[in-house]
Amino acid sequence: MLRKGKPSGGGVDLTSLAYAANSLGGADITYGTGGWLKTQMPHVIGTPDVNKDNIPDIWAVDTTGTMYFYTGGRTAHGSRITATWVNWNGTLAFG
């Protein structure tokens, strides 16, 4: 699910991210489907734009410890790219 924040003073109004009803548009929208449950993809982080298209991107680690990179998009994320074959299962944080 994706929750869009309301613009505020050059940033985002954090209270608009607290509840779907407060968000820009008043509801969460589907951004990605399949494989995003915590049991399938336990580590996910949104990052500033990596591929220079002015849209934040996503890094994720699955249950096998494989790290993936997903380009962000305005309505859906891009195809995943295997970022590394190193086992990240023992890692507590990344990003």
Image (cartoon, helix red, strand yellow):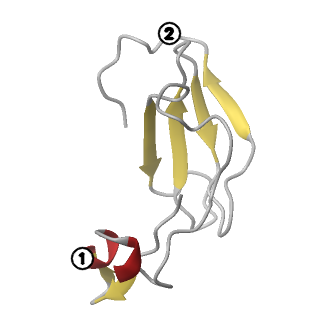
Q: Position of residue 73 (x, y in %)?
A: 66, 62
Check the picture and name the quadrant holding the C terminus: top left
Q: Secondary structure at mark 2?
A: loop
- Measured Cα–Cα span from mark 1 to mark 2: 37 Å
Which is more toward the observer, 53 or 81? 81
Which label sits on residue 87? 2
At label 1, the amino acid type is Thr
Q: Secondary structure at mark 1?
A: helix
Q: Position of residue 30 (x, y in %)?
A: 62, 61
Residue 9 horizontal side relative to residue 66, left or right: left
Q: Position of residue 15 (x, y in %)?
A: 24, 76
Residue under circle 1? 15
Residue 38 horizontal side relative to residue 17, left or right: right
At label 2, the amino acid type is Asn
Question: What residue lies at 43% left-to-right and 13% top-to-bottom?
Answer: 89
Say above or below: 75 vs 77.
Answer: below
Say above or below: 20 vs 40.
Answer: below
User: Looking at the image, do the residues carrying marks 1 and 2 touch, with CB atoms under 8 Å apart?
Assistant: no
